[in-house]
Image (cartoon, grey):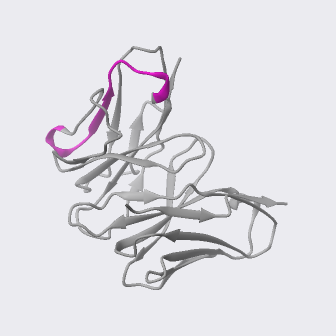
Amino acid sequence: KQEVTQIPAALSVPEGENLVLNCSFTDSAIYNLQWFRQDPGKGLTSLLLIQSSQREQTSGRLNASLDKSSGRSTLYIAASQPGDSATYLCAVSGTNFGNEKLTFGTGTRLTIIP
Amino acid sequence: DTGVSQDPRHKITKRGQNVTFRCDPISEHNRLYWYRQTLGQGPEFLTYFQNEAQLEKSRLLSDRFSAERPKGSFSTLEIQRTEQGDSAMYLCASSLAWSGTEAFFGQGTRLTVV
């Protein structure tokens, strides 16, 4: 059974700093890994999708990397802003055909201090 | 098309009542997923459809839960005889039906059972 772990559970950093969020998964047989952002009481916003054959994806100040063999991904946020404060979730999808449900970690709650 | 739409956004119900939630996916997406999220946890998979066919149901989905997707468009999730443990955020997501595609989530329906 796939298990996804995110460390740390919470993180506070001053505005302007670069930071890294970590995600690990137990079964390396994945199709893709997706990073999401969730604001309190809201749904999930997709940030980046990394296919299993890829090593990284970039969008603006965000960069996500994937090391499938070691079961790890990182989300790098450059020049953090107060608007980046949210919970960040990573999720992986399985490889069985038709079984592409996402398995989520419990998230990292990020607070950017102005 | 503005993304995945869920209705209602909030629902308060008395224990023992039935409730029904609706999800309208992105129009060209033929896969539709339901997830449940409790406070401080990541979303957990409940069920998914490809077009109108329900292809997988989680063991979390007790016999009080039923989901439909008539005509492969919108979907409904019904909970019968609600219990306090059903209180959660119910999230709907949609994607295209081939491996490794990005999932897009709605804003969720927050259910409170009193």
Figure quadrant of the C terminus of chain A: bottom right
Q: Residue at x 47, y 49 (%)?
A: B43
Residue B41 vs residue A81: left or right?
Answer: left
Percent position (x, y) of residue A101?
33, 57
**Above or below, A15 relative to B36:** below
Which quadrant holds residue A111?
bottom right
Q: Which residues are magenta?
A: B70-85
Q: Residue at x 52, y 76 (%)?
A: A72
Membership of B69 in magenta stretch? no
* Towards the viewer: A114 or B20: B20
Figure quadrant of the N terminus of chain A: bottom left
Which quadrant holds residue A76?
bottom right
Percent position (x, y) of residue B20?
34, 26
Residue A75 vs residue B24: left or right?
Answer: right
Q: Residue at x 75, y 65 (%)?
A: A81
**Above or below, A64 relative to A43:** below
* Towards the viewer: A34 or B6: A34
